Image (cartoon, rainbow, N blue to C red):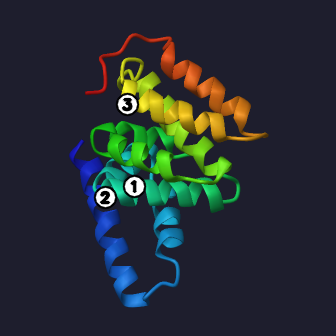
Amino acid sequence: MQMKMRGALRFLLGYVLSSAISGCANPDKELTRELLSLPVEQRAQALSKFPAEKQLDLYMYAYNRMEPPVILAGEVARNWQTTLPVIKSRISTEKSDHLLAGLMMILSAMSSQYCSLAKRDDVLAVASQAVSKIGPPYRDLARKQLNEIRHPENQLPSCR
């Protein structure tokens, strides 16, 4: 466990130093690539060290711009205590169907793996409104994810 934590901290320090020295043109691209080079467990720990807004920025960058598309939904969902309010806010303001579907993936991962959103009327209302605005080809996926959130397979404690 201590080795994993050291790896995550080494990654963060390395990124900060390399960004400061190189003045990299696209820090999200570089940071995302560094993050994705870590083993999954270390990746989740490293991601959790960032503020919730930055976690979502990195997720959205990977979801929208990496080839092949990379899903970090589980890693962001794992940090649900800090990321849920930001996700809720972004869902209510996001205009892109593609990115709305990506945010729904995080909620679905959160609700199926960490804590239930089935009784969170505030989250369900924002998610339902977003799903009603999403067009093809993402509409069916978003509806499926919302249904999975409303009717979870696993009974988990509520996200509070």
Location of mark 3 (residue):
122
Q: Residue placed at 50% from the left, 11% from the top?
A: 153
Above or below residue 144? Residue 104 is below
Q: Which residue is mark 1?
A: 55
Give the SS element for disc 3. Answer: helix
Residue 81: % across, % down: 27, 38
Q: Are marks 1 and 2 in contact (CB under 8 Å)?
A: yes
> Which numbered disc, 1 or 2, marks the residue that appears first in the sequence?
2
Q: Which residue is mark 2?
A: 50
| 4, above or below 12, in the image | above
The one of 74 and 54 positioned closer to us in this rendering: 54
**Pick the front one: 97 or 78:** 97
Q: Secondary structure at mark 2?
A: loop
Residue 22 drawn at (x, y percent): 43, 88
Which of disc 3 and disc 1 is earlier in sequence?
Answer: 1
Q: Quadrant of residue 65?
A: bottom right
Residue 95 is left or right of residue 84, and the answer is right
Image location of residue 108, percent across then percent down: 51, 29
Q: Residue at x 70, y 54 (%)?
A: 68
Q: Amino acid at mark 2?
A: Phe
Whole-Å distance between the Cαs marked 1 and 2?
Answer: 6 Å
Q: Residue at x 43, y 88 (%)?
A: 23
Q: Going from the N terminus, do you reach mark 2 or mark 3 first?
A: 2
Left or right of 79: which side holds 90?
Answer: right
